Amino acid sequence: MRIKLPGSMRTKSILLGIFVVIAIGIFVYEGYNNKKEIETLQKNQEIQLAEKKKEKQIQDDIEKKQEKLEGMYNEAFATFHSKEYKNTIELSSKIIEEEKNYYKAYSLRGIATAYNGDLEAGMKDIDKALELKGDYGYGRFNKALAYELYGKYDDALVWYNKALEIEKYEWSYYGIASIYGRKGDVKNTVEYLKKAVDKNASVKEAAKTEADFNNVKNSDEFKELVK
C-alpha cells in the first residue's frame, strides 16, 4: 500500500524547488570560499618563495663579498711577508674601505705600520682588530710582535701568552724563546723553542741563524735542540 504524503503536488514542487535553490546556494558559497582559500594559499606560497629567493640572494651577495675580501687580504698578507710594508698598508686600507669591520685587515695594517716605523699607529689598528674580535689569536700575536719589535719585552711576553690562550701557534712560542734568548736565559729559551719545534720542525732552520739567540747559541742545550 502506498503512503500518501500530506499537501498538494504544487506545494511539494515549491518545497523541492526551494531545497534545490538552497543546495545550489550552499554549493556556490562553499565553492567561492574554497576558491578564496586556494587563492590565499597560492599568494602566501608566492610570498614565501619570494622571501626565500631574496634571502638566498642576500646570502649569495654576502658570500661573494667575503670571497672578495679574503682575496684582497691574501694579497695584502703576501706583500707583508715580502716586507713590502707600504703596499701592505695600502692594500689593507682598501679592504677596510670595503668593509669597516674586517678585523683581520686592521691587524695586518697595524703590524705593517709598526714595521714601517710607527708603533703608536700600528697599535691603534691592532687594538681595533681586537676590539672587533677579542679572541683573534693572530691579532694578539701581532700585538706581541709589535711590542717585541720595539724592545718592550715584558709586554711582548704578556701578549704572546695571551695569543697562546687562543692558538698554540709555533711562532708565539718562538717569539717567547727569542726574548729569553736576548736575555741569555738558556733554560727558558730552550723550553719555549722546543715547543715551537714540536709544533713545526722547520723552526729549527730559522733558529740556527736567528740573531736573537746569539747569547745562548753556544750552550749545549741549544745546540742539541737545533742540530
Image (cartoon, helix red, strand yellow):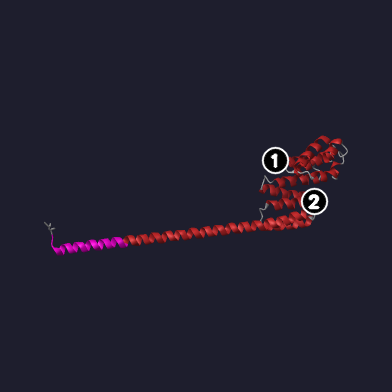
- Camera-side residue: 99 or 41? 41
Q: Position of residue 43 (x, y in %)?
A: 44, 61
Q: Are marks 1 and 2 in contact (CB under 8 Å)?
A: no
Q: Residues within 10 Å of mark 1 (few under 14, many from 20)?
A: few
| Distance CA(mark 1)–CA(mark 2) | 25 Å
What residue is drawn where x is 77% and y is 53%?
80
Which mark is first along the chain, 2 or 1?
A: 2
Residue flagged by tag 1: what amino acid is it?
Answer: Glu
Nearer to the camera, 10 or 141: 10
Please indicate whether residue 67 sits to the left or right of residue 115 in the image.
left
Which secondary structure, mark 2? helix
According to the picture, the residue beneath numbered tag 1 turns out to be 165
The range drawn in magenta is 7-28
| Dominant secondary structure, magenta | helix
| Quarter of the image where the N terminus is located | bottom left
**In the image, is residue 10 part of the stretch drawn in magenta?**
yes
Taking 148 as reference, is 84 above or below it?
below
| Amino acid tagged 2 | Tyr
Residue 54 position by quadrant:
bottom right
In percent of width and height, residue 146 lies at 77, 47
Q: Quadrant of residue 31?
A: bottom left
Residue under circle 2? 115
Name, please, the residue furthest toward the front: 1
Find the residue positioned furthest to the top. Answer: 187
Q: In the displayed image of the protein, which residue is found farthest to the right?
A: 218
Tell me what residue is drawn at x 16 percent, y 63 percent.
11
